[in-house]
Image (cartoon, rainbow, N blue to C red):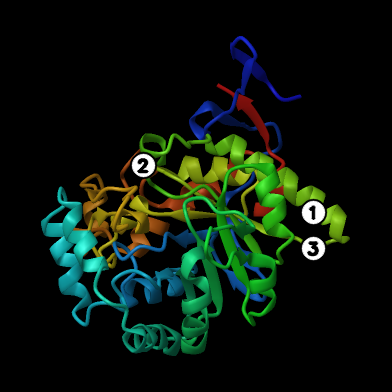
Amino acid sequence: MRDYVEIGIGREARRTYDLADISLISNRRTRSSSDVSTQWNIDAYTFDIPVVSHATDALATPDFVIEMGKQGGLGVINAEGLWGRHEDLDGAIAEVCQNPGDLAVLQRLHSAPLNTELLSERISQVRDSGVTVAVRVSPQNAREIAPIVIAAGAELLFIQGTLISAEHVTTGGEPLNLKEFIGTLEVPVIAGGVVDYTTALHLMRTGAAGVIVGGGVNTNAETVGIDVPLATAIADVSAARRDYLDETGGRYVHIMADDDLTSSADMAKAIACGADAVVLGPLLAQAKEAGARGFYWPAVAGHPRFPRGVVEYAGTLDFDLDAIDESGEPTLEVVLYGPSNEPFGQLNLVGGLRRAMAKCGYTDLKSFQKVGLAVR
């Protein structure tokens, strides 16, 4: 039963929970972490680990996306970021990092015209490496950009904003009906973000292969007052999936949790609430392969009129000195698989997830979604 509280005469609000408010319950026979499988799949694509990178230039250079694929995860390219706007991608990213307190720099770099040939060339470079190619477009630009990135080699299309719905209505323009649009595409679509049951169910009915819960690391709470705690949001969207599964006679839609996940414990709790995979941002920014080398910003930080994110340093010095490269940064492999002597779950993320599953007695991700939970 949902928990509502009266916040004033005639006005109620629902009590909700964030990941920090819950804890896993270990009430089964424990297992060895070496027996745990973290493999997951979406449509025809299988991945060794349930880790997806947030679509931001702070992470996704061609080298980073390729390395994410080699490490068993999925790197996502932001088609509307700097990839198709600046020939010198590394130089543009470096300029942002040199001016972290000045969003005007990022906005100026994002205002450059989109060179679709340059964007296609860089997407093709990733495709030629043999890893799965995933590209993000915004709902408002999906019609124009999606065919370009698909032609360049995108195999998974992310239609993503901080919050979206199945149909975007605008005065004086043609609304984007995702069901009609997705039906015209030849690649699987992952859509989001959403934070509630109803919107998630509507998105599932569009034919999306996956739904993103949350909007990444952003300032929505400070700018628009929307900040639904992630544990409740994932659980609600998972309930929508169960109902949609019954409605369709068995069509399963994958759930990806995209929020401010700060540790391997957050990853485990997100999956326990019903997510199939997690979308990571600042945790992956620690890696030497990340484009901004420790700095991080979400895609919406570059919005020309209303940015909802900041450029900040997300790196850490608390890593295993025997497992870093000469530049003094942990490799992506260390971030994901260790070894680590950092005790707060910011390195060896997959190892932390495996141990959480094993301690609770589960050996695969799907069954781990049934683990017991407690409110702290």
CB contact under 8 Å: marks 3 and 1: yes
The secondary element bearing badge 3 is classed as: loop
Earlier residue among tags 3 and 2: 2
- Up the image or down, 346 lies above or below 8; here it is below
* Residue for badge 2: 219
* Residue for badge 1: 244
Q: Nearer the viewer, mark 2 or mark 1?
A: 2
Specify the amino acid type for callout 1: Tyr
Seen at 70% across and 64% down, the residue is 206
Q: Nearer the viewer, residue 302 or 64?
A: 302
The secondary element bearing badge 1 is classed as: helix
Residue 202 sits in quarter: bottom right
Q: Position of residue 107 (x, y in %)?
A: 23, 60
What is the CA distance from the residue labelled 3 to the residue labelled 2?
34 Å
- Up the image or down, 216 lies above or below 10; here it is below
Question: Farthest residue toward the top?
Answer: 9
Q: Answer with left or right where residue 57 lies relative to residue 27.
A: left
Rendered image: mark on residue 53: none
The secondary element bearing badge 2 is classed as: loop
**Mark 2 Cα-neighbour bin, 10 Å: few <14, some 14–19, many ≥20:** many
Q: Position of residue 161 (x, y in %)?
A: 48, 57
Specify the amino acid type for callout 3: Arg
Earlier residue among tags 2 and 1: 2
* Residue for badge 3: 251
Q: Nearer the viewer, residue 220 or 274?
A: 220
Q: Position of residue 143 (x, y in %)?
A: 53, 75
Q: Answer with left or right where residue 255 lies relative to residue 103.
A: right
Quadrant (top left/top right/bottom left/bottom right) for the C terminus: top right
